[in-house]
């Protein structure tokens, strides 16, 4: 299976790379070069097109939730990032010309938690799985990287191993991480 | 106008072809081959000005370093350009020998033909030894049009430098701006100054001083500095580059190709639109010239590239994978092939920066 992952930054890529190993797919990364949900929304339609015409089986658009309200399955909330991204995807999909694909492009909008860095913190600190995802993103970043402005990607690479170890031991992961793994597997 | 360039065996260029438009903007990652393409154009123009010695300089080192190392040794080196002159489309092909370390890089074969029928205008060496070129007058005239092409890799530290009043021409790095300004006829200097004032509000005048057996200097008088002229070294990088770019355009001949390495270099994004406007105007009616010029530039700035959102046919993406040679793609074609549309939804610079075209 070929998967295209569009993510916001290098640390997200590191964490999602670990997911790739667990799911066993061939993953191509594309990084939104400017940070922020507005940039993700602006490029979402073109990302969907690139995935469709590039022959990918699955597209994962990944963004941090930051301070936006959590997504609920039945709600339509203007500030909810999942709702907004899913609307972009839903608008783009019917415009895709048939190119003789074996199966239509599947998409996963992953806005799992305030900050994906929370999963690294869970892997590193043995904290309770749910609490860590509910911590404010600035708090998570401070806990992981302190005042350092550089070296985040390298540090993340180290902690990803610990995260993988915990998952391999069969520990119950944070809820949002579990959801992403299940979504990708599905 | 140069229509097409094809290069074999030069730096990253291995059977690499570039199709040119009146304005061509090259995008691509570091090492993809953008600079090599500009450099190849400059080399062909140097050849047209002064033959193989001017093309590669007097030492053998330059050409040897720049040859592409292929499997089993150095690849044959050749440059081929299609260009129109008057109503005729020509193809010039220059082949250099594979030998290395020679004090004289030499030329193995030079061929100028009229397209599309491939009628030979000039052939070197001739088919029959001693036979003169078929039409030296036409050959010289056609080559003179290629010789006007120039590529600039502007450097603010060179642009600011004082220089001899009689220095001839503006160098590739921008050295010589002072003497160029000093030698411009007053009406042309006013025209250049007016352009600069529009691009740099607050400018009162461009000033040149010195000369007469001493070096010439240049600077800017502006509303904040009163009567004092700010010497070039105290101007911002962006202001110096802007003057360098204007001088490059003003020093060109109508119909000439003018190349700019990293046209966005040193400019605040708020100036990108003005820079694109300036270069576009140069290709449409001319800036400081009696007619339009052809412009080719490189850029790494998504914000500048996005100014071409509705001009995709002018964008070329240069790519290179592993040890393969550089490849040049039309961005308009890539958008159609990779995204299935004529125009991207997001600004083209952002789509390019996210690598959605590769």
Image: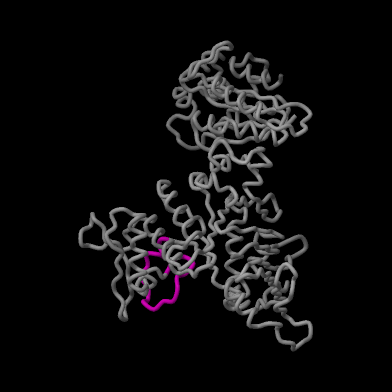
Name the colouring of the figure.
one colour
**Predominant SS along the magenta part:** loop
Residue A110 on the magenta segment = no
Instruction: In this rendered view, identify the residue nearer to me: A159 or A186.
Output: A186
What residue is drawn where x is 49% and y is 27%? A144
Give the vertical position of B328 relative to B1 (above or below).
Answer: above
Q: Furthest residue to the left?
A: B227
Looking at the rendered structure, the number of numbered marks drawn on it comes to 0
Q: Where is residue A123? Give x, y as percent.
A: 58, 22
The N terminus of chain B is located in which quarter? bottom right
Q: Furthest residue to the bottom?
A: B130
Give the vertical position of B21 relative to A25 (above or below).
Answer: below
Give the vertical position of B308 relative to A37 (above or below).
Answer: below
Q: Where is residue B79? Give x, y as percent.
A: 67, 67
Q: Is residue A154 visible in the rendered structure shown here?
A: no
Instruction: In this rendered view, identify the residue nearer to me: A146 or A138.
Output: A138
Q: Furthest residue to the front?
A: B87
Question: Which quadrant of the figure has residue B219?
Answer: bottom left
The answer to whether residue B278 is left or right of residue B207 is: right
What residue is drawn where x is 29% and y is 57%? B203
Q: Is residue A95 visible in the rendered structure shown here?
A: yes
Q: Where is residue A88? Give x, y as percent.
A: 58, 26
Q: Where is residue B124? Give x, y as percent.
A: 72, 80
Question: Which quadrant of the figure has residue B142?
Answer: bottom right
Q: Which range of residues does the magenta coloring cover?
A: B156-175
The C terminus of chain B is located in which quarter? top right
The answer to whether residue B260 is left or right of residue B268 is: right
Q: Furthest residue to the top?
A: A74
What residue is drawn where x is 58% and y is 28%? A159
């Amino acid at each position: 299976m070929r998967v295209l992952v569009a993510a916001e930054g290098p640390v997200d890529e590191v964490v999602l790379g670990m997911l790739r190993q667990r799911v066993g797919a061939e993953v191509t990364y594309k990084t939104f070069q400017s940070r922020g949900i507005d940039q993700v929304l602006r490029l979402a339609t073109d990302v969907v097109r690139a995935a469709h015409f590039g022959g990918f089986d699955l597209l994962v658009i990944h963004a941090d939730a930051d301070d936006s309200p959590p997504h609920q399955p039945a709600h339509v909330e203007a500030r909810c990032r999942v709702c907004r991204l899913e609307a972009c995807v839903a608008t783009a999909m019917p415009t895709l010309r048939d190119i003789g694909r074996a199966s239509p492009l599947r998409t996963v909008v992953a806005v799992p938690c305030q900050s994906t860095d929370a999963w690294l913190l869970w892997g590193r600190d043995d904290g309770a799985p749910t609490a860590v995802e509910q911590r404010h993103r600035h708090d998570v970043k401070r806990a992981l990287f302190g005042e350092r402005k550089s070296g985040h990607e390298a540090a993340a690479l180290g902690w990803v191993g610990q995260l993988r170890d915990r998952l391999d031991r069969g520990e119950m992961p944070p809820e949002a991480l579990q959801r992403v793994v299940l979504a990708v597997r599905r | 106008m140069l229509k097409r360039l094809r290069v074999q065996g030069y730096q990253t260029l291995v059977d690499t072809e570039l199709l040119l438009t009146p304005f061509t903007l090259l995008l691509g990652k570091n090492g993809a081959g953008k600079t090599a393409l500009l450099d190849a154009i400059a080399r062909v123009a140097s050849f047209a000005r002064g033959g193989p010695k001017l093309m590669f300089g007097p030492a053998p080192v330059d050409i040897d370093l720049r040859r592409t190392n292929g499997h089993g040794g150095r690849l044959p080196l050749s440059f081929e350009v299609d260009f129109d002159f008057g109503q005729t489309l020509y193809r010039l092909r220059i082949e250099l020998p594979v030998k290395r370390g020679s004090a004289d890089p030499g030329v193995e074969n030079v061929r100028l033909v009229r397209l599309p029928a491939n009628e030979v205008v000039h052939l070197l060496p001739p088919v029959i030894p001693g036979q003169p070129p078929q039409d030296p007058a036409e050959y010289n005239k056609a080559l003179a049009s290629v010789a006007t092409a120039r590529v600039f890799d502007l450097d603010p530290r060179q642009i600011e430098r004082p220089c001899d009043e009689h220095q001839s021409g503006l160098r590739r790095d921008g050295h010589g701006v002072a003497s160029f300004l000093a030698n411009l006829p007053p009406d042309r200097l006013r025209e250049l100054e007016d352009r600069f004032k529009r691009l740099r509000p607050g400018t009162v005048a461009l000033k040149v001083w010195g000369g007469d057996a001493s070096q010439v200097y240049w600077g800017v008088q502006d509303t904040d500095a009163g009567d004092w002229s700010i010497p070039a070294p105290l101007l911002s990088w962006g202001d110096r580059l802007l003057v360098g770019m204007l001088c490059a355009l003003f020093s060109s001949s109508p119909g000439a190709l003018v190349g700019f390495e990293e046209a966005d270099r040193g400019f605040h994004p708020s100036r990108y639109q003005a820079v694109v406007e300036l270069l576009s105007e140069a290709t449409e009616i001319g800036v400081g010239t009696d007619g339009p010029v052809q412009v080719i530039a490189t850029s790494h700035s998504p914000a500048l590239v996005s100014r071409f959102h509705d001009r995709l046919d002018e964008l070329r993406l240069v790519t290179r994978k592993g040890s393969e040679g550089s490849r040049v793609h039309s961005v308009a074609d890539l958008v159609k092939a990779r995204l299935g549309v004529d125009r991207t939804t997001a600004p083209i610079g952002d789509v390019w920066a996210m690598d959605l075209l590769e």
